[in-house]
């Protein structure tokens, strides 16, 4: 019988990879707490939370139970003309948490962004967006069009992507000149803009850059002044990751439309949501979207349980401890010659290198230290489960060892 590894190489696409993939895909046989167990018996501390999602760790008894309870009632029913308690209760919880009362359930982050864009287009009757360089909003066409035009690989799909308006990437510190350029750009395009779309405070997969919250406040003001909507893509930043419940909270800003995903189900199932204000919902009327698995009962039930867990756990303290641990644990990495910058915000730790890293080599090093990371391009980064505790040190030690093994700049 062929092994899982052989069949994987024969048949299966992995993210941003050819088939077969260039490197090995490690077979995971179990995930428990903050640890992944590989089929060969190795145990790895997970520094990635399965791409921002598994904030409570894996195999959590409360989340497992929520799924078991729900599956006994129903795994799925269509959402057209029918409704159910887990979805309705979750919508109520999300509306209370965000101050945005109207909730559209989508099945992935990218689709939530598509829905946000549709909302803005339908509401304003306009169809251009303004965003900043260095962003990432998903892999579907509408979302791709607002990803960074260089590292978002627009060149592969040029001709198929709408051309939106791009401001420069917001600097880490506040720069009045940048803000003035941003204002001028919004003013110049206001007549054709439906919305401004950004990831609040942290730009994730577009380069793991952090920017000053004052820019977000400025964007809110500009959107109001020019009668344009503000869309906050909180898919990565939502649910405490940056040290505040939402990225927008750093700036005290409420967007007109917000996208949530990833940690929404504690990393159990694919579910996302697009929320908007009363005004936007009323202005849209009929929203032209309705996926088959909209508001899936299993996903909404586990999301409800995950948000309950989040409310109960001292996430602010946990994220604060992780932040302090990352600052201390990565300080030495900043001295390595191949390292350009080390930055930390909340439970996010980033080593930016001068040159693109050899991903397989870095993975070998961190796996020797018993850690799972997925570096890309010039980034070795972590966003661990909030429950990581003392295992964080293992992650920072592994990252530091990886930084030391980089060549000189
Ligand atoms: N927006 C942001 C900010 C993201 O980080 C991601 C996922 N990396 C997405 C959208 C897309 O989400 P999904 O992968 O669930 O489609």
Image (cartoon, grey):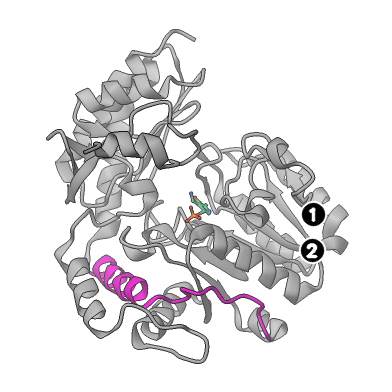
Quick one: label 2, few (<14), some, or many (20+) residues within 10 Å? Answer: some
Residue designated by label 1: 186
Residue designated by label 2: 127
Q: Is residue 153 magenta?
A: no
Q: Pick the residue in front: 275 or 14.
A: 14
Extreme-top residue of the structure: 408
Cα separation, mark 2 vs mark 1, equals: 15 Å
Q: Is residue 97 left or right of residue 225?
A: left
In the picture shown, does residue 268 fall above or below 304? above
The quarter of the displayed image where residue 220 is located: bottom right
Q: Earlier in the sequence, mark 2 or mark 1?
A: 2
The location of residue 104, given as percent across then percent down, is 53, 76
Extreme-bottom residue of the structure: 81
The reply to whether the residue tagged 2 has its Cβ within 8 angstroms of ligand 1 is no
In the picture shown, does residue 279 fall above or below 52? below
Q: Is residue 75 left or right of residue 42?
A: right
Q: Is residue 311 magenta?
A: yes
Q: Which residues are magenta?
A: 286-312
Q: Pick the residue in front: 310 or 292.
A: 292
* Quarter of the figure that contains the N terminus: top left
Quick one: label 1, few (<14), some, or many (20+) residues within 10 Å? Answer: many
The location of residue 197, given as percent across then percent down, is 65, 57
SS assignment at label 1:
helix
The location of residue 66, given as percent across then percent down, is 22, 74
In the picture shown, does residue 137 fall above or below 107? above
Residue 49 in view here:
yes
SS assignment at label 2:
loop
- Residue at 42 percent across and 11 percent down: it is 337
């Amino acid at each position: 019988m062929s092994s899982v590894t052989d069949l994987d190489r024969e048949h299966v696409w992995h993210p941003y990879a050819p088939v077969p993939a260039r490197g090995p895909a490690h077979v995971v046989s179990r995930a428990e707490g903050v640890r992944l167990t590989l089929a060969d018996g190795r145990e790895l501390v997970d520094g990635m939370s399965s791409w921002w999602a598994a904030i409570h760790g894996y195999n959590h008894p409360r989340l497992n139970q929520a799924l078991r309870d729900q599956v006994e009632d129903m795994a799925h029913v269509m959402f057209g003309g029918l409704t159910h308690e887990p979805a309705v209760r979750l919508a109520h919880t999300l509306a209370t948490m965000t101050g945005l009362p109207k909730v559209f359930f989508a099945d992935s982050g990218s689709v939530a962004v598509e829905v946000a864009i549709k909302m803005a287009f339908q509401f304003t009757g306009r169809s251009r967006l303004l965003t900043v360089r260095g962003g990432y909003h998903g892999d579907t066409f509408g979302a791709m069009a607002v990803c960074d035009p260089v590292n978002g690989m627009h060149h592969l799909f040029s001709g198929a992507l709408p051309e939106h308006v791009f401001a420069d990437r917001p600097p880490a510190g506040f720069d009045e000149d940048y803000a003035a350029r941003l204002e001028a750009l919004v003013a110049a395009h206001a007549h054709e803009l439906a919305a401004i779309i950004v990831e609040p405070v942290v730009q994730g997969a577009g380069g793991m850059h952090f920017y000053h919250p004052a820019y977000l406040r400025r964007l809110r003001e500009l959107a109001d002044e020019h009668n344009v909507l503000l869309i906050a893509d909180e898919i990565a930043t939502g649910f405490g990751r940056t040290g505040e419940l939402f990225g927008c909270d750093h700036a005290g800003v409420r967007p007109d439309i917000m996208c949530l995903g990833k940690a929404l189900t504690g990393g159990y199932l694919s579910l996302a949501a697009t929320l908007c204000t009363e005004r936007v919902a009323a202005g849209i009327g009929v929203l032209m979207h309705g996926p088959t698995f909209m508001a899936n009962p299993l996903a909404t039930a586990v999301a409800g349980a995950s948000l309950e867990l989040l409310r109960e756990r001292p996430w602010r303290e946990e994220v604060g401890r992780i932040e302090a641990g990352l600052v201390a644990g990565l300080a030495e990495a900043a001295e390595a010659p191949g390292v350009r910058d080390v930055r930390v915000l909340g439970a996010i730790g980033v080593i930016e290198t001068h040159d693109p890293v050899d991903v397989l080599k870095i993975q070998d090093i961190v796996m020797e230290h018993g850690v799972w990371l997925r570096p890309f391009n010039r980034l070795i980064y972590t966003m661990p489960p909030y429950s990581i505790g003392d295992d964080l040190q293992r992650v920072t030690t592994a990252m530091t060892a990886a930084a030391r093994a980089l060549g000189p700049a």
